[in-house]
Each structure stands twice: as structure tokens, then as C-alpha cells.
Image (tube, rainbow, N blue to C red):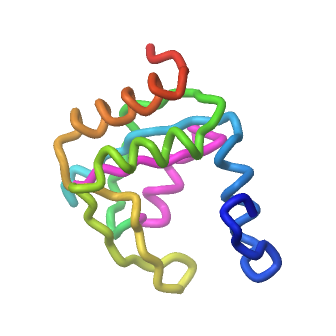
Amino acid sequence: TRAGHCAQCDPKKIAFQKRHSATGFVYVAFSVAQKLVKIGSTSSINTRGRTLRNQEYAGANDWRIRRWARVKNMGKVENDAHRLLKGSSSPRAYQKDGRPQQAAEVYRCHPLEAIKSLRTAVVSNGEEWD
């Protein structure tokens, strides 16, 4: 890969690289019950909120996507938004398909702070913010 990782040893690296420069949506979702914010990316904004709720991502089943932007480099924009919220990171363990997972893209911060980080990431990557 561009980062020097072996794609044969870890095929997930190929998907990560494709997503990094793919066109799609970067979003901010909120869980009121857990007081968590998630920043993520998807190619289908219409189904992502339902998927987060059904998977009980980070132990929450009340996820609602509140803001999103369609961008050309969704993985890069997502990573930039994550960096801006680094100090608020609040990883959570949860089960997905019966296997333990780590939700690393969740934060404990005010929802407006998360939206501001998304806006900053979108604009700094030369994209439009509506």
C-alpha cells in the first residue's frame, strides 16, 4: 500500500485505500442515550443510520444522522474530522455478528463541536459546505 503495509497479509488495507479517495458521504451521528457522537463515512447515507441502530454500534441503538456532506475523498475528509476531535475520543466495545468489536470513531463532545470539525474538514479539502 502507499503506507508500506502488505495488502496480501491484510486485505482490509485495500478497502481502506479505496475508501480514502472515493466519492461518498461523511456524516455526524448522535446517540442521545449514550451521549456519544460518531463521525463516519458511507456510500449510502439513506441506510447508514438504520445500520448503526441495528448493529447497536458502540452499544447504542438510538443513532441519528444529523449532518452530512457529499465529498470526493470521503476517507480523507473523515480522517481529518477525526483528528480535530482527537482529544474527545471515547472508544467503546460492542458485539457485531457475535464477535467483539471496538468502536473507535466515537467521541464525547458537544454535537455542535462535531459538526464544526466536519465542516472544517470538508472546507479544508476544497469541498462545498451547505
Front-lying residue, 35 or 129: 129
In the rendering, at what x and y percent does residue 57 appear?
42, 64
* The C terminus - image quarter: top left
Where on the picture, by quarter, is residue 87?
A: bottom left
Above or below residue 22? Residue 54 is: below
Query: Does 91 sit left or right of 35 as displayed?
Result: right
Give the number of marks.
Answer: 0
Front-lying residue, 2 or 121: 2
In the rendering, at what x and y percent does residue 107 appear?
27, 55
In the rendering, at what x and y percent does residue 108 appear?
20, 55
Query: Does 9 sit left or right of 106 as displayed?
Result: right
Front-lying residue, 3 or 61: 3
Query: Does 109 sit left or right of 116 as displayed?
Result: left
* The N terminus - image quarter: bottom right
Magenta part of the protein: which range? 36-57
Q: Residue at x 29, y 39 (%)?
A: 114
Tell whether position 47 is magenta.
Answer: yes
Tell whether position 27 is magenta.
Answer: no
Where on the picture, by quarter, is residue 94?
A: bottom left
Q: Residue at x 57, y 38 (%)?
A: 45
Residue sticking out furthest to the front: 4
